[in-house]
Image (cartoon, rainbow, N blue to C red):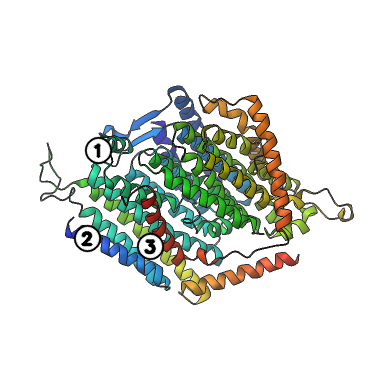
Amino acid sequence: MIAALIPLLHLLTSALCGVSGRMARWVAAASWAGSAGLIGLLATKVVAAGEVRYTLGGWPNRWGIELVADEPAIALLALLGLLHGCVYAFEWAGRREASFYVLLQVLVGAAAALTVSHDLFNIYVLLELMTLTSYLLVGFERRPAQLWASLKYLLLASFGMGLFLVGGAVVYEHAGTMNLGELAAVIRAAGDPPWVRLAGALLLTGVGVKSGIFVLSLWLPTAHASAPLAISALLSGVVVKMSVLEILRLAAIFPLAPAIWVLGAITGVLGAVYALFERDIKRMLAYHTLSQIGYALLALAGGSPAAAIAAVAYLVAHGLFKALLFLGTGLAARHVGSAHIGRLVAARDALPRTAVLALFVGTLGIIGWPPLDGFWAKELIGACCDSMATRVMLTVLALGTAASFAKLLPLFGVHRRESDECERGTANRGEMVAIGVLIAGVLFFGWSTPWWISGLRLSAAKLMLDAGRAVLIAGAGWLTYALLKKRWVALPRAIFSTEEGVLAVLLVFLGVWLAIGGGA
Amino acid sequence: MTAGVVTAVLLFAIAALALIVRRDLVFKLVALGLVNGSTVLLLVSLPRGIGSRPPIAAGAIPPTAADPFPQAYVLAAIVINFAVLALALVFVMMLVERYHTTDARRLEALIREEREAADAEGEDA
């Protein structure tokens, strides 16, 4: 019941925001508070019962809309609520026009509904609603670069959803249901007919286009880098995660693990490489969204329920530090007028202390410095994925991330005395609240995990060992960067045009289909 | 496989090809419309869904009735695709106003030039 109320509240108040003109931000804030309360209530129920199911209107599941709130859903809902609030706080003084709040409310409402959706029909409609509002938000300031990024996003994502629809058609023709629970039962009863692999490959590719996988989501770096910064924080922090959650749901039904592992490894490595050779912080952060999705997919490919929870924990941890990094960059860029590292370092003494602190904590979080949230999430993944290949990949990815973030180190240097007279910018109260909350989230994530992840066992000795290793990796990453600094490589950009994007989607579909044994 | 399913798959392939080889944005949007159209055709011509009577009944639904589920799915898809295409056209119009071209490659190059100019400014600083 509550699961249905959360999205409804957002969608209804979005209409209210539209007619309330200058009061829109107050309506939006009230709606956020109400929804936060509902999420809290739902969370206590899920923690007590393990899972809450509800079918709208009492129809049988084949026709009705079933909502399922489980641990992954509640973790992402909580992250969504938190980041949503932070974006409002960050933009509070900016007094955006009413349409900004209307769009954000719809976006968050669709994302919230997506977390608890349990049938392909509903997932399709909500994914489309969510991305439709993201197109508008990416192009919100109507700068040409934003419009173009948004249009490329639209072309690729709609094509991907075409594949998803075809996958849905295959499922319905053979299984006669779109409800995920019933579908799982049908597939278990049918053994292993070929249509399962075809449908799995189509659905995975379709959702993959929206979920930040390097070869599929080549629209993402430009779109997330050119969107208004608070929006980037929300898109990168949580909207992309909703599609990854759907991959998790699909992986529980279809035999997709090998394909997900390969996609995770590719997106992790290529995302990190492109981020490494990028000097605009916004674009670098966008590439890192791709590389960090790689971690989550590698964990997901583990297959066990514990692995799924570890993947979700990584998504939440990533949402916290990535939003923090985006908001820190946004605050810095507001004072300098550019997000280029060279410009920011040159204006280092004029940056608000809050921005520098946000970037500092966010950097430590993303490189997995103990005991921040990135470290804990990596521990969780390590605890349930003990295959050698996965371990090697995780180390490589950590190294790449550390090397890439070594670029930001000059920002955190000591205060230079000669520029004392240079006036330091300050953050307003809303920005401070948003960044403060996210810093607290990054710091205390580790202590919150026992509460929402049941049956977690990490030994103290292993933690100490891994903490040492994390510090070593950070150091090695810095060394790697120091070596690479003089050998700057211009990576090919042609792959980011729409033509190649559509071709890549088709090729990945074929690859996934073959990887999970569709050709046999 | 019915004739509808075969036609739908062919149309989808043609639309995908057009999206890859045609550089004109308006043409791309037409192709996107075709992607959506072909999926709609596929869904309504699924052998499972086809029936000879409308699925309207007071009591038990007659076995010869068409399956309403794919039709509801299609209805949602049509509405969504209409919204997406309308929005895409608005974006194209705004881009044309500024750059006077609908060529995707040219637009990509023009916008990248602008971005690289901004980057170069950053390197100098």
Q: Nearer the viewer, mark 2 or mark 3?
A: 2
Q: How crowded is mark 1: few (under 14 residues within 10 Å), some or many (20 or more)?
A: few
Mark 1–mark 3 Cα distance, whole angstroms, equals: 39 Å
Q: Residue A488 location in percent, x, y?
A: 68, 63
Asked if residue A331 lies left or right of residue A209, the reply is right
Q: Which residue is drawn at 10% across and 42% down?
A: B63
Q: Please state which amino acid type lies under the numbered disc 2.
A: Val
> Which residue corresponds to mark 3?
B85
Specify the subunit that label 3 lies on. Answer: B
Q: Please state which amino acid type lies under the numbered disc 1.
A: Ala
Asked if residue A302 lies left or right of residue A335, the reply is left
Query: Residue pushed farthest bottom?
Result: B100
Q: Residues within 10 Å of mark 3 (few under 14, many from 20)?
A: some
Q: Residue A242 location in percent, x, y?
A: 46, 44
> SS of the residue at dot 2?
helix
Q: Quadrant of the N terminus of chain A?
A: top left
Q: Do labels 2 and 3 share a chain?
A: yes
Q: Is residue A15 visible?
A: yes
Q: How crowded is mark 2: few (under 14 residues within 10 Å), some or many (20 or more)?
A: some
> SS of the residue at dot 1?
helix
Mark 2–mark 3 Cα distance, whole angstroms, equals: 25 Å
